[in-house]
Amino acid sequence: MNLILAFLLFFIALAHGVDIETYPAVLDKVPAKSLAAGAGLLPGDRVTAVDGVAVEDFDDLADALGHAGPGKTAVLKVDRSGTVKTVAMKIRKGVNPGFEPRIEPVIGTVAPAQPARKAGLKTGDRIVSINGSKITWWSDITPVITRAKQGPVTIGILRDGKTVSIPVTPRQDGVMKKPVIGISPKPMRMKVRRFTLVESVKYSGAEVAAIVTETAKTVWHVIIGRQKFRDAIGGPVMIARIGYEKAKSGIWDLIHFAGALNVMLMVANLLPIPVVDGGMIVLALAEGVRRRRFSAATYGILMNIGIAFLVGVFVLATYNDILR
């Protein structure tokens, strides 16, 4: 039922139309040996059309390349410093074309419980420097923070016409294997995108599958010690806080959060812990193998262990939420 509800919520949102954050189709860095580099594209190129279809932003560009299909050659019209050029690029299945949008270094969102939020960075701040290194585009930020490794970094921001220096101590992300501070860029363009019923079914299923995979991966990383419990698990306080922020962003952001929360609950409910469904499945399988039921006393002990474990997780998660 968690999965079905999440699917329905995503389907309704997509069929109704969702706000898409996007950027002008201007290329930032073009990785070496990428399809874009092989076609001769350069940083600063603005893609204006693909196979004769006009392109306004990166969302349009992704759609146009997707319609071209793997194995085919897409013809791109490019504006390079005022000069129009035509570029042919062969699409290869499973190979990233190497397009990155050129994004202004203006903060759009500051994630809850992350170093940037704790340090006082705000939406709308323009990052102008990090540890003395000039920041021109958003892609300049990650390399500088990664080079800093451990310890705080000094971030120079432009806020209300004044330059302010704020120290931020990045946290090491166990999944991405790099230091992060918890910010994302401000979109240069917002547009409403509506999907057909077939697309809504397709993408709703893909979104559910993606969240199941990421949630299961996160739980596994916590179990094996690759990711810290306090960074991965949120309690009721965190859920309420994120829900409040999503509600401020709009009804469709809140609907997506509700769907994602249902998927996460489904994964948690399938963990092999006594009391929850996953534990009961394991016990049923064990009884099937041994050809007889466990005694009521054994069930009682296992249920008490499961309840104690869940209460412990709940208390610890709530305590971490309050610390955040």
Image (cartoon, helix red, strand yellow):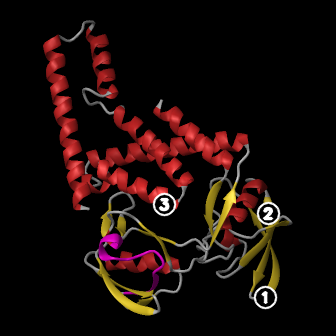
Nearer the observer, 132 or 112: 112
Q: Residue at x 31, y 11 (%)?
A: 288
User: Residue drawn at (25%, 10%), measured in percent from left and top?
Assistant: 290
Task: Classify mark 1: residues with Cα within 10 Å, few (<14), some (14-19) or many (20+).
Answer: few
How many residues crowd around disc 2 within 10 Å: few (fewer than 14), some, or many (20 or more)? many
Alpha-carbon neighbours of circle 3 within 10 Å: few (<14), some, or many (≥20)?
A: few
Q: Position of residue 102 (x, y in %)?
A: 60, 77
Q: CA distance from mark 2 to mark 1?
A: 22 Å
Q: Which residue is drawn at the image coordinates 79% and 61% (left, top)?
A: 73
Q: Nearer the viewer, mark 2 or mark 1?
A: 1
Circle number at residue 248: 3
Q: Is residue 282 above or below residue 27?
A: above
Mark 3 and mark 1 in contact? Answer it, CB < 8 Å: no
Q: Residue at x 70, y 80 (%)?
A: 45
Residue 175 x %, y %: 37, 57
- From the viewer's perspective, is residue 163 above or below residue 114? below
Nearer the viewer's eye, disc 2 or disc 3?
Answer: 3
Which residue sits furthest top? 292
Q: Quadrant of residue 306?
A: top left
What segment carries the magenta color? 116-130
Q: Earlier in the sequence, mark 3 or mark 1?
A: 1
Find disc 1 in the rendering and name its residue.
82
Q: Quadrant of residue 19?
A: bottom right
Q: Which residue is mark 2?
A: 74
Q: Position of residue 232 (x, y in %)?
A: 32, 53
Q: Along the horizontal axis of the image, is 129 left or right of 200?
A: left
Tell me which amino acid carries mark 2: Ala
Q: Amino acid at mark 1?
A: Gly
Tell me: residue 226, above or below residue 167.
Answer: above
